[in-house]
Image (cartoon, helix red, strand yellow):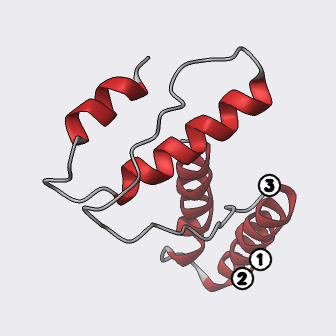
Amino acid sequence: MKTQLFIIAAVASTAGAFSVSNDSCARRQFLQTASTAAASTLLFPTIASAEIVVPEQSKEYEFPSDFGLTYSYETDAAKVRAHMVTATGLAKGSDRMEDFGKNLKK
């Protein structure tokens, strides 16, 4: 949301530079809006890009037996991540897919 607002503000600040006006003020206005846009891109953080790896879809998988919480953040986070990677890789019609989904909520 913040990124979208930033892009809209940058576009709005540069839109005036391309409007029709007299030649003496046009260059000054263009330089002002261009410098504002350049400064805003340097001062505000840019969009972070991350590489996303989606596992291969498969019907064969090892049904996990380690559902439930241990109330240890590191252990539970590792289990949830492993379960979500498995769930992402499940193809339609996988064996015990419904049971897997129900157990994720426990």
Quickly name the residue at label 1: 31
Please indicate whether residue 79 sits to the left or right of residue 98 in the image: right
Mark 1 or 3 closer to N-term? 1
The one nearer the camera, 18 or 58, is: 58
Check disc 1 and report its element: helix, strand or loop. Answer: helix
CA gap, disc 2 and disc 3: 26 Å
The one nearer the camera, 24 or 37, is: 37
- Name the kind of residue labelled 3 in the image: Phe
Q: Residue at left 58%, top 79%?
A: 22
Q: Is residue 44 depicted above or below 49 in this figure?
A: above
**Label 3: few (<14), some or many (≥20) within 10 Å?**
few
Q: Are marks 2 and 1 in contact (CB under 8 Å)?
A: yes
Q: Residue at left 37%, top 25%?
A: 103
Could you say where residue 47 lies in the image, as x and y percent from the top left?
Answer: 67, 61
CA gap, disc 1 and disc 3: 20 Å
The one nearer the camera, 75 or 18, is: 75
Residue 77 location, quadrant: top right
Quickly name the residue at label 2: 27
CA gap, disc 2 and disc 1: 6 Å
Q: Residue at left 24%, top 61%?
A: 59
Mark 2 or 3 closer to N-term? 2
Please indicate whether residue 96 sits to the left or right of residue 15 in the image: left
Q: Is residue 70 depicted above or below 19 in this figure?
A: above
Q: Which label sits on residue 44?
A: 3
Check disc 2 and report its element: helix, strand or loop. Answer: helix
**Label 1: few (<14), some or many (≥20) within 10 Å?**
few
Could you say where residue 38 lies in the image, as x and y percent from the top left?
Answer: 79, 71
Where is the C terminus found, in terms of image quarters? top left
